[in-house]
Image: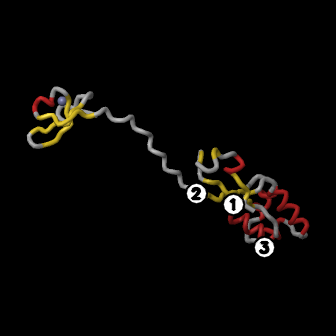
Amino acid sequence: MYCDMCGSDGELFKCRIENTELNVCNICSQYGEVIHKIKAPEPETPKPVSKPLKRSEVIQIIIPNYFKIVKNKREFMGLKQKELAKKIAEKESVIHNIESGHMEPNMDLARKLEKFLNVRLVEQYEEKGKVIATEDTGPLTIGDLIKIKK
Ligand SMILES: [Zn+2]
């Protein structure tokens, strides 16, 4: 707490100075009438940190062996890369790059492939907002942070 008049730190008194109540130091209190001494403020108790919002974020990832799945399923269906490309309106080079693992399909393409080949190429992960600790569950484990949404 600081003196309202001179700004010095230390013991303060509540004083009436020119009809105004001010919290002032010992020196400044001489300019007015001391009402009472102000107790040193209690050490501030840390305010309970408001709980971070638990927001869930769904992360979609292409599964690591997407290229094998695409290749296997395409071959299983008896399609050439060119034919598959035509079916999903993509370039043959795109299919080639995907199957060789050189190009991870973007979500749109992955969805198209999933639909056409009837396979699963995208996995969804639900990532909870970065909550370090909550009152009810305690610190989160890695398992809590990343749960596979089924
Ligand atoms: Zn003062």
Give how far across and how far down residue 113 sits, in percent: 77, 67
**Residue 43 located left or right of residue 128:** left
In front of the other: label 1 or label 2? 2
State the mark number for residue 87: 3
In the image, what residue occupies the spot 69% across and 50% down? Answer: 144
Residue where numbered disc 1 is placed: 106
In the image, what residue occupies the spot 74% across and 59% down? Answer: 123
| Residue 3 visible at all | no
Q: Is mark 2 within 8 Å of ligand 1?
A: no
Do tag 2 and tag 3 residues touch (Cβ < 8 Å)? no
Give how far across and how far down residue 88 sits, in percent: 75, 71
The quadrant in which the N terminus is found is top left
Q: Amino acid at mark 1?
A: Asn
Disc with the residue nearer the chain's start (1 vs 3): 3
Q: Is residue 37 above or below residue 112?
A: above
Callout 3: helix, strand or loop?
Answer: helix
**Residue 80 located left or right of residue 6:** right
Q: Amino acid at mark 2?
A: Arg
Residue where numbered disc 2 is placed: 55
The residue furthest left is 18
In the image, what residue occupies the spot 15% across and 31% down? Answer: 29
Q: Is residue 147 above or below residue 86?
A: above
Q: Amino acid at mark 3?
A: Lys
Disc with the residue nearer the chain's start (1 vs 2): 2
Question: In terms of image quadrants, where is residue 36?
Answer: top left
